[in-house]
Image (spheres, helix red, strand yellow):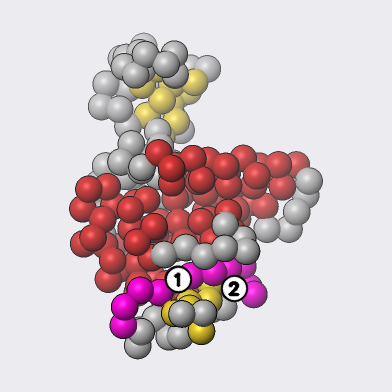
């Protein structure tokens, strides 16, 4: 979040929707003279909208002084690529693992009462190469399941994702 000075050039949003100005590399938006990290453009629209909806709900929860509200904001912004590891850098390492975890938490909160598929998470953060992220998503899901943040199911039964073969679903756990 660095201030934009005279040395920084900007460009109007090229989508024609009147959105905020962007830096030439597209990595940041300029709002009221300040530079903010832009949302990862590789997030498919449906997942981006779910994550934005979760972010807005989390911001309302902050105003309502709900206990987990700030964590929800952090998770949603990290999932959107606005915090944590820059989305334009290599998708690997602990910082990217945190983006995977944040995306799982944000989507399971948003779909409370419903489930998500590990591929939803991979698609939300992986762009066109999402399939390559499936082992990492399952690895992070196992850690979250161990901490009771999510519950992994297969055919309606709780399973250990490390042992499960085939499609699984994830729901919000008791500690999330």
Is residue 168 highlighted in magenta? yes
Where residue 3 sits in the image (x, y, percent)? 45, 24
Could you give the CA–CA distance between mark 1 and mark 2, rounded to whole angstroms? 12 Å
Looking at the picture, tell me which residue is in the foreground, 100 or 27: 100
Q: In the rendered image of this protein, does residue 63 appear above or below residue 159?
A: above
> Residue at 57% of width from left, 57% of height from top?
111
Q: Is residue 119 left or right of residue 159?
A: left
> Residue at 33% of width from left, 36% of height from top?
41
Where residue 164 sits in the image (x, y, percent)? 36, 84
Is residue 170 highlighted in magenta? yes
Residue 145 appears in view = no
Label number found at residue 173: 2
Q: Which residues are magenta?
A: 165-176
Label 2: how many Cα within 10 Å (few below 14, some 14–19, many 20+): some
Q: Are marks 1 and 2 in contact (CB under 8 Å)?
A: no
Q: Is residue 176 left or right of residue 167?
A: right
Q: Which residue is mark 1?
A: 169
> Residue at 40% of width from left, 44% of height from top?
81
Q: Main secondary structure of the magenta part?
A: loop
């Amino acid at each position: 979040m660095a201030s934009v000075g005279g040395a920084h050039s900007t460009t109007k949003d090229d989508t024609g929707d009147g959105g905020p100005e962007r830096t030439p590399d597209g990595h940041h938006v300029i709002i009221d003279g300040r530079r903010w990290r832009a949302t990862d453009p590789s997030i498919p629209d449906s997942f981006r909208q779910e994550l934005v909806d979760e972010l807005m709900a989390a911001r309302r929860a902050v105003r309502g002084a709900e206990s987990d509200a700030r964590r929800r904001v952090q998770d949603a912004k990290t999932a959107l690529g606005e915090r944590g590891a820059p989305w334009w850098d290599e998708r690997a390492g602990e910082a990217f693992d945190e983006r995977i975890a944040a995306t799982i938490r944000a989507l399971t909160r948003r779909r409370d009462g419903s489930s998500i598929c590990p591929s939803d998470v991979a698609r939300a953060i992986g762009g066109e190469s999402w399939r390559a992220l499936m082992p990492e998503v399952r690895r992070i899901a196992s850690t979250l399941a161990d901490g009771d943040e999510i519950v992994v199911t297969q055919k309606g039964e709780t399973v250990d994702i490390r042992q499960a073969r085939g499609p699984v679903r994830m729901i919000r756990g008791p500690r999330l």
